[in-house]
Image (cartoon, helix red, strand yellow):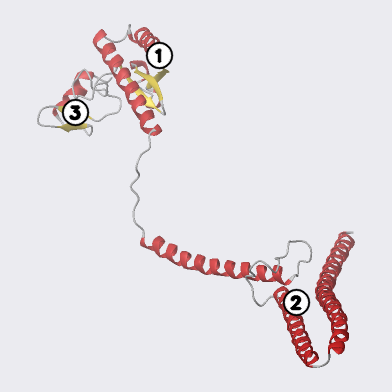
Amino acid sequence: MNNDSVTWEILGKGKCSFKKKVDTEIFCLNEYNVTGLCTKANCPLSNSVYSTIILDKGEIYLYMKSVERAHLPSALWSRVLLSLNKKEAFNVIYKELKFTQNIKHIKKCMKRYVRIKEILKRSRKLILQKQVKMMPIKKKTERRDKTREKKALKAANLLNNVEKELLNRLNTGIYGSLYKFLTPKKKMKNKDSELTKIFDVMGENKDEMKKKGKKGKDENVNYETMSQEGGGQEDDDEDVDMDDDDEDVDMDDEDEDDVDKECCTKLFNNKIIKIDERRRNSYQTKRKKSIDKQQDLLKKAKMENFSDH
């Protein structure tokens, strides 16, 4: 039989693994202690009948110890779940302990219940608040980040090059009528594109036509001066002839402008036709490849079925 007084004399005066001495008091580190003080009334080892309140996974339980289960260490403690309502929990504590414990011990259990409830509230508030975490500095991770940044910069340069190539293709007219082309009035970003070349040819043709028109006017002026030196009747006849010549030159200039426009449009249309042919050929090749793949897959499936049989 276990005697409470004998156990207390051994633990109180002798050695105990849960005992912690301080200048003023002696504390008990056992989790089943109600007050945390090392005394005979509060010691869970030297009392065969004992009760405490413990927090387990966010829930509050009333733990009770009895003499009848002393020979079963695994079933020595029985527990009862307590509600978070203060009145209900106090009623349960009083009903369970009124026949086994003193009123002082019951009040100690109630105080412990209140204290645990306050701890739960504070812990929930701390979880909801934003807290600063102390993170260690890792040199290896910093080196990895630096190398990744360098690689990312290289990839960004590649992306810029890809954008430039796409703009060049759009300006050259590879995409046909899918997108809007830049007009000759706007500034062209790519000076080497084929559209700019076409517009340059159009501008050169216009300049040549203007130069030809100026040369014709200069010849007409010289011819008029020569006619003024001659006779009066000849002047009148020549004036009529010059008017007819001016009208003919204007008609020739208009015809030449129309011819230049037709040449430019033909060049542009021929370029678009070539691009369409390329697109059609690429589409046909892709379609042939997809058909060949499907046929290969069907042959493999047939061979597998044949091998299974």
Labelled pair 3, 1 in contact (Cβ < 8 Å): no
Identity of the residue drawn at 37% across and 9% down: 87
Q: How many marks?
A: 3
Give SS at disc 3.
Answer: strand
Tell me the CA gap for discs 3 and 1: 30 Å
- Choose the circle earlier in sequence order: 3 or 1: 3
At mark 2, the secondary structure is: helix
Q: Nearer the viewer, residue 199 or 35?
A: 199
Residue type, label 3: Phe
Amino acid at circle 1: Asn
Measured Cα–Cα span from mark 1 to mark 2: 92 Å
Tell me if mark 2 has few (under 14), some (14-19) or many (20+) residues whose alpha carbon lies within 10 angstroms of its own. some
Q: Which residue is mark 1?
A: 85
What residue did someone put label 3 on? Answer: 27
- The residue shown at (57%, 69%) is 158
* Residue 23 image offset from top left, x and y in percent: 9, 31
Q: Which residue is mark 2?
A: 202
Q: Nearer the viewer, mark 1 or mark 2?
A: 2
Q: Do the residues bearing badges 1 and 2 touch, measured as CB atoms within 8 Å? A: no
